[in-house]
Image: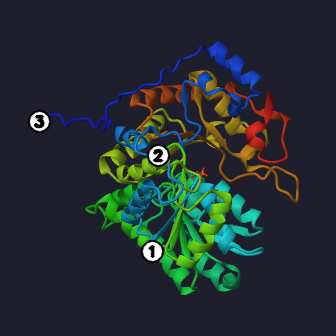
Amino acid sequence: MPRSLPQAEPFRIKVVEPVKMTTREERARKIESAGFNLFGLKSTEVYIDLLTDSGTSAMSDNQWAGIMLGDEAYAGSKNFYNLQAAVQETMGFAHVLPTHQGRAAEHLLFQVLLKEGQYVPNNMHFDTTKGHVLNKKGLPVDLVTAEAYDATSPYPFKGDMDLQKLEQFLTEHHAQVPLVMITITCNSGGGQPVSMSNIRATSQIARKFKKPFFIDACRFAENAFFIKQREKGYEDKTILEIVQEMFSYADGCTMSAKKDALVNIGGFLALNDFEVYQVASSLGVLFEGFPTYGGLAGRDMEAIARGLREVVEEDYLTYRIGQVKYLGDKLLDYGVPIIEPIGGHAVYLDAIRFLPHIPQHQFPAQALGVELYIEGGVRGVEIGTCLAGRNPSTGDHDYPKLEMLRLTIPRRVYTNRHMDVIAVACANVYERREQIGGLEFTYESPILRHFTAKFKRM
Ligand SMILES: *Cc1c(COP(=O)(O)O)cnc(C)c1O
């Protein structure tokens, strides 16, 4: 029998950025002088940077060629019309408002639709979405399925909305709900996908209560790939068909182009309702720019337009999701505890099972991040007690249910050999886990403390 060929990267590399491996002693010194906070490191001090998948994608030759075709027009840029056409082809919404990032699209949407004291139900709000709801004195409500909080449940769509809870919430509070949202994939829940049947049913419930339904669409293509792999009836559909069906159930979306549009900056608000569009676009002039550029250069819009068409290619997604799974499977082979099933854009180490002897108030996920950096020059990000901040009424840490170190894989940036390095580094840390102690604050800022906190070893 001939061997089947392994699946390699569906691209060739024609520009490289050299990265340098430092010594263990250097890294131990650097992280100590950064106050044991990974945000305090310079990117040149990191060998493999897994802090985020946002704005870290490698663009294609086609996108770079598009950069040269930016017309930088204030009004009526041809690149805007190309972006609008790309959004209409993939997502099908009538109106497109470019913005400088995803959060700016959220800002405009909530400025128009949300009033003080109103609720926004979502499967799980991303930080900036939650921040913008709170900024308008609204109340974000997370109604994700209970499976999302069980780190070992193999449930294939852990991003699903709990439909019963949503229906019940709307029955009780519908007068105080201006819109329903769903986040695909569910970033705060570990990059877990939402099924097509759940998107459809969420839309039906929203319609029943006459509420507009918006998708937080940052990782829409990754979500579609999971639907194709895991949901009955979708195995023979193209990614584009799946994407079009997902968005057909919605009235609009907010998008960070820094994720699934494969660019380094940009975003947009897309929607069908012309009146909402009109109000949002006049506010957009104030906060972002004229509606045909919205804070972006023509070249950025061109790169987004091209990225949206590339990201739905199945070869790309097979490689993308495959690489994240490759890393996750290696870690499982080494016995390293991770959140399962493996999500779309990151592998999450489960710090509670990894370091069971470190109590949550001693920041086990942060301690794990520090050790992984010292071990292999790999920078992850803590998604745990430090990030969660304090409960405003009790002043105590707002302990999250999951304590994780996120290893976020940038798109088209690292090879599987890099994944091998990451996996071995994690395995080595796991082997010496009993010698690892907790951390305590030496500095804590009152807001967004995870960016600037400083720690010492216990
Ligand atoms: C990144 C992200 C945002 C915000 O987008 P920015 O471009 O970073 O402003 C919103 N929602 C989700 C789910 C995200 O991952």
Which label sits in the foreground, 3 or 2? 2
Look at the numbered disc 1 and give the secondary structure of its residue. Answer: loop
Task: Determine whether, in the image, residue 233 is placed left or right of residue 141.
Answer: left
Q: Nearer the viewer, residue 104 or 294?
A: 294
Three-letter amino acid code at the position of disc 2: Arg
Spot occupied by residue 221 in the image (x, y as percentages of width and height): 41, 55
From this view, report whether residue 438 is shown above or below residue 388.
above
Mark number for residue 1? Answer: 3
Mark number for residue 299? Answer: 2
Picture quarter with the C terminus: top right
- Please say if the residues under marks 1 and 3 sit with CB atoms less than 8 Å apart: no
Quote the CA–CA distance across marks 2 and 1.
31 Å
Look at the numbered disc 3 and give the secondary structure of its residue. Answer: loop
Task: Determine whether, in the image, residue 262 is placed left or right of residue 97.
Answer: left
The residue carrying mark 1 is 249
Mark 2 or 1 closer to N-term?
A: 1
Spot occupied by residue 141 in the image (x, y as percentages of width and height): 68, 68
Determine the residue positioned at 57% across, 57% down.
294
Is the distance from the Cβ of mark 2 to the nearest ligand 1 atom less than 8 Å?
no
Mark 3 or 2 closer to N-term?
A: 3
Spot occupied by residue 309 in the image (x, y as percentages of width and height): 36, 53
Quote the CA–CA distance across marks 3 and 2.
50 Å
Three-letter amino acid code at the position of disc 1: Tyr
Mark number for residue 161? Answer: none
Mark 1 or 3 closer to N-term?
A: 3
